[in-house]
Image (cartoon, helix red, strand yellow):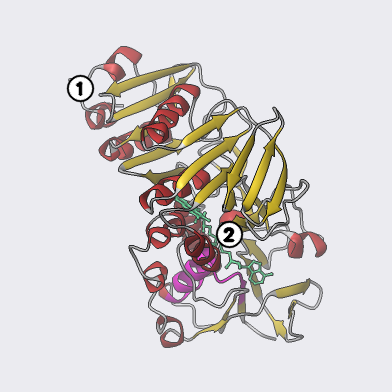
Amino acid sequence: MTDAIVIVGAGHAGGRTAETLRAAGVTAPIQLIGAESYPPYERPPLSKDLLTGKIAVEKTYIQPAAYWAEHDIALVLDAPAAALDRAAKQVRLSDGRVLDYATLVLATGGRPRRLSLPGSDSGRVRYLRDIEDTRAIRAALGPDARLAIVGAGVIGLEVAASARALGAAVTVLEVAPMPLGRVVDRALGEWFMALHRGHGVDMRMGVSVQAIRDGAGGAVLELADGATVAADLVVVGIGIVPNAELARDAGLTVDDGIVVDQFGRTADPAIFAVGDVARAFHPTVGRHVRLEAWRNADNQSRAVARVIAGGSEPYVEVPWMWSDQYDINLQVAGLPSAVDASVRRGTDDKFTVIQLKDGAVVGGVTVNQGRDMRPLQQLIAKAAQVDAERLADPAVPLAQIAKGA
Ligand SMILES: Cc1cc2nc3c(=O)[nH]c(=O)nc-3n(C[C@H](O)[C@H](O)[C@H](O)COP(=O)(O)OP(=O)(O)OC[C@H]3O[C@@H](n4cnc5c(N)ncnc54)[C@H](O)[C@@H]3O)c2cc1C
């Protein structure tokens, strides 16, 4: 019987899982199976410094390329896993190889949700999830390029900022009335709209793309209101779909991601899921959530690896993500669904918004005010009841409020 650990998905979460297993003293064979040709890397620079050309590809690697062999982790690249056989405890790769496992970790992340409308299969339409996507988008961008971005979410707006830095003319098309609707409230959405307009982006909200016509002079996007937008390149950022088919086809519970507990375990005790593909129970929010964020990929995978190594600590952390656009750093903590009050402190270009529900701090946002993030997370973790007037008082540092809460 094998004691091998197989990790499917050699991305951020898969890589961290392998690394943490070795650091925790696990000596069993570890195989890290990746569909891409790169060693595990971080994706945040793909829409930022890698896209603008400020950094080289190797800078995105979570470890130097030689690390994996040095730690006796078998990195198997360009080898997508095709199927699981839970009864036989085997993974079949698309090239026919079959791997036995004692423990299996699914770290397959997600793929971009595709546009489905006439002409959306045009070669001018691109998505951004991996290094090759960044390379292709960068190759098509330049001072004279006209870029249309479909979707004013985090990825769309980061691409807009990077493309402006490269001198491209940028139009953002969004069906919702405000940008960043999944991460910030309306007031902050307006703030980000003004930010991008101030940088020369044509922000068109409440519009719906109906068709994309490809011609010799570029693509023409046809909008529902009859308007048209001409573009050399179209980048679509309308969310991701979790790569959960392996789990689903093997009979595991999948519901917008592979459903796992706070230890990353599926209903099959030999199979775990980590990162963007996992819909994990989160003690701090009291329900199952699927997080698409760097820190979750980084820390949930570490927590799960320690459980596989024999530990018993669940993953308990306030959800957190960030985005960089131009010289603006946005950070978001918590997952407030229904908020009944928001308190804002700071100036027009450097501020913190604290969200309350039933008097308790449930979430918050900082804009160029990262130093408030740690106390904010402490307040959220405690569901601290804090007087709104005190929260709004600029004379009282948030760190002091968190200490006393
Ligand atoms: C452009 C971009 C910018 C981002 N910026 C930020 C940011 O600023 N802040 C933030 O908090 N988060 C950001 N994120 C989110 C963050 O990068 C993700 O949450 C993180 O990458 C998730 O890690 P993961 O390992 O779960 O998935 P991934 O990193 O996607 O890795 C999954 C890997 O599994 C592989 N795979 C899939 N199926 C198979 C299979 N069948 N067999 C083998 N391998 C397979 C995939 O090819 C991929 O390499 C960004 C994401 C993107 C795409």
Mark linked to residue 396: 1
Residue at the front extreme of this rendering: 216
Horizontal side of residue 114 vs 57, given as left or right:
right
Three-letter code, disc 2? Val
Q: CA distance from mark 2 to mark 1?
A: 39 Å
Q: Is the magenta region chiefly helix, strand or loop? A: helix
Does ligand 1 reach within 8 Å of label 2's beta carbon?
yes
Q: Residues within 10 Å of mark 1 (few under 14, many from 20)?
A: few
Q: Quadrant of ligand 1?
A: bottom right
The quarter holding residue 217 reads bottom right
Residue 70 image offset from top left, x and y in percent: 41, 87
Residue 305 to residue 234: above or below:
below
- Highlighted magenta segment, given as a residue range: 6-22
Do labels 2 and 1 touch, CB within 8 Å? Answer: no
Q: Residue at x 50, y 73 (%)?
A: 18
Looking at the rendering, in which quadrant would you find the N terminus? bottom right
- According to the image, label 2 marks what residue? 274
Residue 57 image offset from top left, x and y in percent: 41, 71
Tell me the SS state at disc 2.
loop
Disc tally is 2
